[in-house]
């Protein structure tokens, strides 16, 4: 199986199981208030055993090539994926909190000591790259060497690419926005006349909504 075929198969799983949905006529509202014709919720994939296994196998295959000492999942949506990968590769696993609990041991990293270890950070989704890069920083501050961020899907935003490049952080994605939109068009998951509109959002996500008459929603805490 070629890498392109693998990316297409993963994209088709995301579309078939509605982990990614497309709606250019009634766009979704993100937490930031931004309007978008695409929404990704990879948590849905854990509900389907066959597809869950396929995704976990693909993640494990990519991470095996990197050969880290420890698998680190981001809380909370990537914890299950990190656990599945760690089991397949017989590796220790930790998870990374976005912020400390404020009680108990107040750890940002749960599971064990990663100081001096090679780590791969597992994400389910990379959008702007902010949360992923914060997880990387947490691992670095704990004394680990982060070899890569490995995620199921990326929106391919330019600011995320720049962030990882400037931070000298390697990234690996099972599939991406470009592949998914192509697969969606080829398999009738979206009308052909909406494809250009959706691709346009990807190049200007914050300006897309107002440009097409969709009001920006209220930012949620």
Image: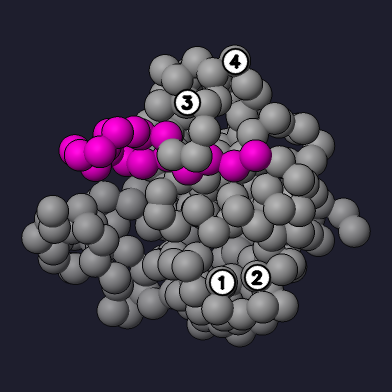
Q: Real-space Cα distance between discs 1 and 4?
A: 32 Å
Q: Which residue is tagged 2?
A: 52
Q: Real-space Cα distance between discs 2 and 3?
A: 27 Å
Q: Which residue is tagged 3?
A: 139
- Mark 2 secondary-structure assignment: helix
Stretch of the chain drawn in magenta: 92-109
Q: Real-space Cα distance between discs 2 and 1?
A: 5 Å
The residue depicted at 60 percent of the width and 53 percent of the height is: 83
Magenta stretch, main secondary structure, is: loop
Q: Which residue is tagged 4?
A: 116
Q: Is residue 17 visible?
A: yes
Q: Which residue is tagged 1?
A: 46
Pointers 2 and 1 in contact (C-beta within 8 Å): yes
Residue placed most toward the observer, 72 or 35 = 72
Q: Residues within 10 Å of mark 2 (few under 14, many from 20)?
A: some
Does 214 sit left or right of 65 as displayed? left
Residue found at the far front of this picture: 104
């Amino acid at each position: 199986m070629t890498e392109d075929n693998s990316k297409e198969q993963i994209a088709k799983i995301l579309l078939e199981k509605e982990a990614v949905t497309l709606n250019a006529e009634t766009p979704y509202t993100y937490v930031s208030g931004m309007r978008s014709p695409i929404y990704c919720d990879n948590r849905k994939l854990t509900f389907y055993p066959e597809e869950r296994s396929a995704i976990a196998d693909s993640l494990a295959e990519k991470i095996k090539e990197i050969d880290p000492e420890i698998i680190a999942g981001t809380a909370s949506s990537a914890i299950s994926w990190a656990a599945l990968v760690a089991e397949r590769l017989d590796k220790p696993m930790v998870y990374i909190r976005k912020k400390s609990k404020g009680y108990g041991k107040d750890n940002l990293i749960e599971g064990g000591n990663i100081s001096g270890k090679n780590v791969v950070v597992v994400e389910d989704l990379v959008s702007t790259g902010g949360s992923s890069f914060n997880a990387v920083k947490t691992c670095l501050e704990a004394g680990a060497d982060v070899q890569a961020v490995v995620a199921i899907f990326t929106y391919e935003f330019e600011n995320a690419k720049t962030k990882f490049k400037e931070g000298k952080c390697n990234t690996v994605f099972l599939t991406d926005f470009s592949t998914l939109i192509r697969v969606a068009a080829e398999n009738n998951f979206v009308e052909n006349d909406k494809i250009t509109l959706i691709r346009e959002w990807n190049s200007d996500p914050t300006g897309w909504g107002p440009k097409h008459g969709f009001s920006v929603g209220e930012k949620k805490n």
